[in-house]
Image (cartoon, rainbow, N blue to C red):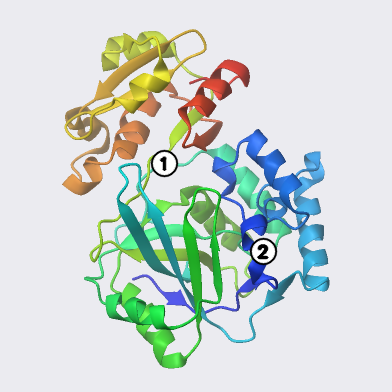
Amino acid sequence: MPTLRAFHGIRYADATALKDLTCPPYDVISPARQDELYARDDHNAVRLELPRGGDDRYAVAGETFTEWRRDDILVRDERASLYVYRQDFVDDTGARRRVTGVIGALELEEFGTSSGVLPHEKTMPGPKKDRLALMTALPVNVSPIFAIYRGKGALTSFFEALEDRDPDARFADDSGILHRLWVVSAPAEVELLSGAVTPGPLVIADGHHRYETALEFARQDERPGTRSIMCFCVDADPEELVVLPYNRAVRGDAVDVGSTLVERFGGAEVPDPVAAAQKLPTGGTHPFVAVLPDRSLRAEIDDVRVVARTGPRHEAWLALDVVALHEGVLPELFPAGIEDVRFSKEPDEIVRLVRDEGFTA
C-alpha cells in the first residue's frame, strides 16, 4: 500500500516572486521556453530542472543548488510537513476548474501485482538516463510526480477549511493559473492527510520516468532518504479531474512509419496536422495525428488491437488514449524501442521538432 510521509521541504525564501522563479517540468520545456525562463530570473528553477552547460550541466545544477542554499535563496522548512497544493484555472471550454491534493514523500515500491503504486505508460531509456544524472547531482527532487487515487472525498472538508487560512505561497502564472500552497505540520493533520492516501492504489498520471529513475537511484544508493520521491496525490472522486493531453515527438530506429500507419492503422493524409488534431473526436476508437518529415497522417487504433498486445485489462485503463498510443501504436512503429521523447501542449512545437530538429514522428 502507498505510504506518504511528511518531509522538510526546501522552498524559495522570497514567496512574493514565485511567478518569475518557477518553471514547468523538464519534458514540456521547449528550447525557446528554456531561453525565456533563463532570462526571466537568475534564480529561476529551470537552472535546476533543465540545466545548461554541455556534458557538465548536471554538475552545474548541483553547484547552483549549493550556492542558492548558501545564499538563502532556498531555505529548508524547520518542521517535517505535508503540503496541500491547489490550482484554480479556466479550461478550454471556459469552465472554471480546481485541482487540490497533497504533496509528500512517497515511499518507493517496485511495480507488480501487490504494489500500491501503478503505472499506465511505458518509459524510454533516454529520459531516464538524463533524470538519473540529475538525481545523482542534486540532493532534492525539483518537481513532484503526479498520482491519482480513489479516496471518496475524505479530505474535501479539510481542503475547504484551508480557505480560512492564508496560504504559505500564492501566485498566478503566465497562463492565468492560480497556484496556492499550505504547509501542514501539525501531527494530527499530517496523520489525516497521509492516512487518506494509504488505502491506495496510486496511479501515476505524470512522472513515470522520474519514478522509475528514483527506483534505480535507490538501488544504487542506500543512504536514508533515497527510498522516496516527492509526489502530488489527488483524489479523483470528489471532483471532475482534468488531466490535459500532451502531444509527443519521438526519436528512434523506426520501421517505415508512413507505410505502417497507412497499412496497419488506416492512416490517411491530412494537409494541416494542427487543424486535424484539434478536430479529433473523443470516445470509441483512439484517433491520432502523426506528423512525419514529409507529410502528416490521421490514423486510429481500437481497444481490440490494444488488448491483443496487452491482454485483458480494466476498462478504465483501456479507455486512455495514452495507453493505446504507448501499448498499441509505438511498439509497432519503433520495435527496437524509443531513444527520446519530447512533450508539448502545442501541436506547432511537435511539427517543429519533427521537421526542424530531426525527431522521427
Q: Position of residue 261 (x, y in %)?
A: 34, 14
- Residue 150, percent from left and from top: 25, 65
**Residue in the picture at 54% in, 68% down:** 170
Residue 107 versus residue 258 in the image, above or below: below
Distance, label 1 to label 2, CA atoms, is 37 Å
Q: What residue is shown with label 2? A: 17
Dot 2: element = helix
Q: Which mark is residue 106?
A: none
Identified by mark 2, the residue type is: Ala
Q: In the depicted view, which residue is nearer to us: 228 or 101? A: 101
Residue at (79% x, 39% y) in the render = 54
Q: Position of residue 164 (x, y in %)?
A: 40, 83
> Residue at 41% across / 22% down in the picture?
274
Residue depicted at 44% across the width and 33% down the height: 247
For label 1, the crowd category at 10 Å Cα-Cα, with few meaning under 14, some 14 to 19 and many 20 or more, is few
Q: Which one is in front in this view, the residue at disc 1 or the one at disc 2?
A: 2
Circle 1 SS class: loop
Is there CB contact under 8 Å for labels 1 and 2?
Answer: no
Q: Quadrant of residue 63?
A: bottom right
Indicate left or right for 291 with 217 as reference: left
Quadrant in which the N terminus is drawn: bottom left
Q: Amino acid at mark 1?
A: Lys
For label 2, the crowd category at 10 Å Cα-Cα, with few meaning under 14, some 14 to 19 and many 20 or more, is some
Label 1 sits on residue? 122
